[in-house]
Image: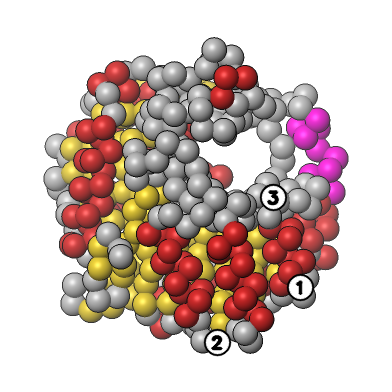
Amino acid sequence: IPDVHTEFIDLYFIDPTKYDKPAKYCRTSACQALLREINNAKQSIDFAIYGISRQPEIFNALIEAKKRGIKVRGVTDADKYNKNIYSDTEFLSNNLGKDVLKTDFLTTKRLETLKDQYLTDKRAKGNFKGNPEYAKYIIEGREVSVKTVSEAPLPIQEGIMHNKYFIFDKKTVCTGSTNISSSGTGGYNSNVVACVKSNDIASLYLQDFNQMHDLELFSKWKTSNFNNRKVKLNDDTAMLVYFCPQDNPLYEGLKPIIESAKKYIYIMAFYFTDSSMTQYLINARERGVDVELILDANGAANSYSKHHILRQAGIKVKVENFGGKMHMKSMVIDDEIFVLGSMNFTKTARTKNNENINIIWNKKGAESFKKYFVHLWDKLPDESLYGEIKPESPKSINSCSDGLDNDHDGYFDMKDYDCR
């Protein structure tokens, strides 16, 4: 049962306060919706996902769909060693057949030089720090300069295949922030899935998918060839679809809706590092719009995170303590508009990665997003408005007993120093 049902769009929210650890079975309504669509597919299933791990029901459903004659095609991500971070992805490839499941540019002949850049770049050896970022913000007419630089070695990459979408029978698209994993569809992180029944929307997604799967074009090699990216589904619902990096979702899509906000802008974000978007939110706050943001603890620990400057400008930012991630890439505006997809609010996501982002005009959906945001906001302590909560620590609920390396330092639970 969806959390929100409309004529064309069903929304499924995954509540991070509901679970104390990930699950290897389909316990969320979002996972069950995907499973239902896979099992009910009549002709084709096309998917672009980051990978798949510890979700046997989804895994087996895709295999069974192929066995019963459904045309199953997919693209996933791969790292510099042509591996996927999600352990079951390579087995899915073997089961579906390598002619069916393709990976990103690392296995693409016309982009072999990028593979070489991965293997030979000094940053992959851990002896090169990120480039400094210089940004200037205008707060109440005063210029504030900020310099940030990553303290961690960063590998060169042309972009990752970070989408999380399925296209069923060329007429239904399920998309959002949810990875096919025990903490994603299995339920632990904060996420959303939207299933949209529209031939026009499916057509837009198929154009993006076919570039990656059929033409083997990824990242900056992709082209934007959409004649009409805004689709009016009915009098109550319209949808604007962007794909990265070939489109321009920030300046053409997000900037106008932020500037149109009159009452509030509520944001739920895994990463928030985009300087331009930061200034747009500061401007909105200064014209009287209530701007609030829930940020993931890992995202807040990122050197380039903009929550400090947002707080300096008077914008309320809470850093989550859920244990699971605040993995959404969403915003809701004025009970009118909501945003969802795979694109984090970072310059890298919109200019390098293979991503999708959807801006949707629908009051019922927007009201449900606001309700979900307020629910999570109220669950977070006032302390989260000011301090930094470590993603794996006693203050991050369940993070010291969930079996995950929440801060990606190589240790988990009581083996992690911050838990001890």
> The residue under label 2 is which amino acid type?
Gln
Q: State which tag comes first along the sequence, 2 or 1.
A: 2
Name which residue lies at 84% across and 43% down.
Answer: 119
Q: State which tag comes first along the sequence, 3 or 2.
A: 2
The one of 133 and 121 positioned closer to us in this rendering:
121
Name which residue lies at 73% across and 48% down.
Answer: 79
Residue 281 screen position, x and y as percent: 30, 39
Q: How many marks?
A: 3
> The residue under label 3 is which amino acid type?
Ser
Name which residue lies at 61% across and 67% down.
Answer: 60
Name which residue lies at 48% across and 51% down.
Answer: 186
**Colour scheme of the picture:** secondary structure
Q: Name the residue that disc number 1 marks.
A: 97
Q: Is residue 31 magenta?
A: no
Q: Which residues are magenta?
A: 116-125
Q: Callout 1: helix, strand or loop?
A: loop
CA gap between label 2 and label 1 equals 18 Å
Q: Callout 3: helix, strand or loop?
A: loop
CA gap between label 3 and label 1 equals 17 Å
Say if mark 3 contacts mark 2, CB within 8 Å.
no
CA gap between label 3 and label 2 equals 28 Å
Q: Which mark is residue 87?
A: 3
Q: Residues within 10 Å of mark 1 (few under 14, many from 20)?
A: few
Q: Which mark is residue 43?
A: 2
Residue 134 appears in view: no
Residue 263 appears in view: yes
